[in-house]
Image: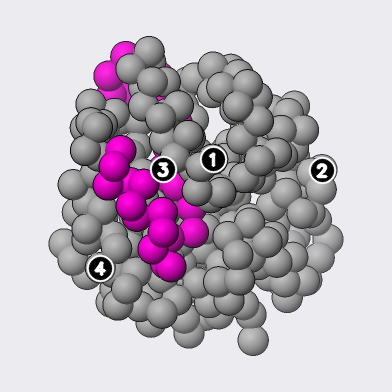
Amino acid sequence: MLKLIDSHCHLDAPELNGTGAKLLSGGREKGIAAFVIPGVRSSGWTELMTLAEQETDVFAAPGLHPAYAEQWTEHAGQQLRQLTIHPKVVAIGEIGLDGVAGPGLDRQEEVLRAQLQVALEAGLPVLLHGRKATGRLLAVLRELQVGEKVGGIWHGFSGSLQVAEELLQLGLMIGVGPILLRQSARKLPEAVRQLPAEMLVLETDLPDMADRPETLVAVAAKVAELRGLTLEETARITTENAARLFGKIV
């Protein structure tokens, strides 16, 4: 029996209309043993925590997505700090910089730094979102030594081996998701093939990149193919990596 961890899935996404929990059974049947749900909007943290409390294999990573950085307030910061002591909270996410959506990058960086400080104080890893702002995000992570101190995952990685190696040097992992399954994918397969195995974790980014949790198995199978491993070996390695980062969630 496979034992996989989906390190990034939005089972609480508004477009699922409250049906996210119903998708869990299909994933469980295929061997997904734990699901980590990142935050997006501060207004969604309550629903996120409720879902994590109701399902034993669901864990939360509350945070404010950079596209919604304008929602950050002193109250939101206090609320996030309070959530870090909840037993089902295993990370702070989805946080980062987005050069396409949201307020200006200066404001986004201000909110990112505030959330990174919460993560550092709580000793929690981070789930990172980076789009069209890679260099700036890397600079912040390097300055604050986030990877060395608490670790984290660059979610939805699609970059080059060179960028991935820089993340490795910073003590971070990469989230490998359905982008790997695209015929057009060029950079990511090479990175997956070349990187140290302990740097890889799996994700679906449901519902944006997948419509059901079982897609994680297809991602794992592609990783196995690229690295010359069995599906079972890939499941073991990536699950051990995620468990090492998040704590014993399986």
Alpha-carbon distance for marks 1 and 2?
30 Å
Alpha-carbon distance for marks 3 and 4?
18 Å
**Does residue 138 appear in the picture of this structure?**
no
In front here: 115 or 170? 115
Task: Specify the amino acid type for callout 1.
Answer: Leu
Task: Specify the amino acid type for callout 4.
Answer: Thr
Marks 2 and 3 in Cβ contact (< 8 Å) = no
Closer to the chain start, of discs 1 and 2, is 1
Task: Specify the amino acid type for callout 2.
Answer: Gln
Closer to the chain start, of discs 4 and 2, is 4
Q: Position of residue 75 (x, y in %)?
A: 21, 38
Closer to the chain start, of discs 3 and 4, is 4
Circle 1: element type: helix
Give the quadrant of residue 69.
top left
Q: Is residue 102 magenta?
A: yes
Residue for badge 1: 120
Alpha-carbon distance for marks 1 and 4?
24 Å
Closer to the chain start, of discs 2 and 3, is 3
Question: Colour scheme in the image?
Answer: one colour
Residue for badge 3: 94
Residue for badge 2: 194
Residue at the (49%, 19%) spot, across then down: 133
Alpha-carbon distance for marks 1 and 3?
15 Å
Closer to the chain start, of discs 1 and 3, is 3
Alpha-carbon distance for marks 2 and 3?
26 Å
Q: Nearer the viewer, mark 3 or mark 4?
A: 4
